[in-house]
Image (cartoon, rainbow, N blue to C red):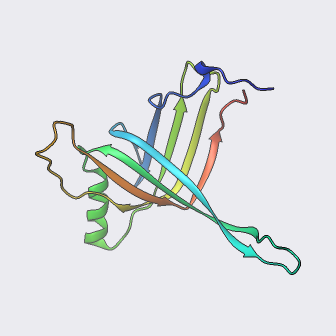
Amino acid sequence: MAKLHSQDTINGKEGKAYAKINGNNEELFFAKTIEATIEKSKSEIKSIGKRMTGHKTTGMSGTGSMTIYYMTPLFRSLLKQYKDTGRDVYFNMMIENEDPASAAGKQVVNLFGVNLDSTILTKLDGDSDDPLDEEADFTFEDFDIATPFNKI
């Protein structure tokens, strides 16, 4: 039976994220958190003689969010490009988890066809001493687990 060893949990600070936008690799060093989720689409299957409704998976949808420090024009410039030209920008992201203290090893997940839903255009906050940050929600069209964690 597998046993959890505390040192094998993943430190969320140990990793990197990159966005490939217009052919350029941009390290997302200004990101505080990045999360991507897959939600399965299901159809209900009802049948005579069964009291329970069955469910058939019929597809998937990818969404995500980032909390980033409000210090880079990167995402605002993509939205401005769309406003000025009508050409929306889709890009790829690569997220690495690599905690050297964990026997789980490295995981690399690629997100393809990332497209921003929203980003903050401007922000001030006279009520806080904390650095400004912003949420940037996105969708993505495909993914690949290029390097999975080790089986522990």
Residue 93 at x, y percent in the picture: 48, 48
| Residue 2 drawn at (x, y percent) | 76, 26
- Determine whether 53 is above or below 130 in the image: below
Which one is in front, 20 or 15? 15
Residue ID at (89%, 78%): 49
Please name the residue shown 76% across and 72% down the image: 53
The foreground one among 27 and 127 is 127
**Residue farthest along the left direction in this orientation:** 126
**Quadrant of residue 104 in the image?**
top right
Q: Position of residue 110 (x, y in %)?
A: 56, 47
Residue drawn at the location 51% of the way across and 44% of the way down: 94
Quadrant in which the C terminus is drawn: top right
Given residues 68 and 26, the one toward you in this image is 68
Question: Which residue is at the far front?
Answer: 51
Instruction: Report if residue 57 is visible in the image.
Output: yes
Q: Which residue of the protein is positioned furthest toward the bottom in this rendering?
A: 48
- Residue 71 is left or right of residue 2, and the answer is left
- Give me the residue at 79% from left, 70% from top: 52
Percent across and percent down for residue 90 are 44, 61
Q: Name, please, the residue furthest toward the right.
A: 49
Count all numbered tags in the image, as a single digit.
0
- Confirm whether residue 27 shows in the render: no
Quadrant position of the N terminus in the picture: top right
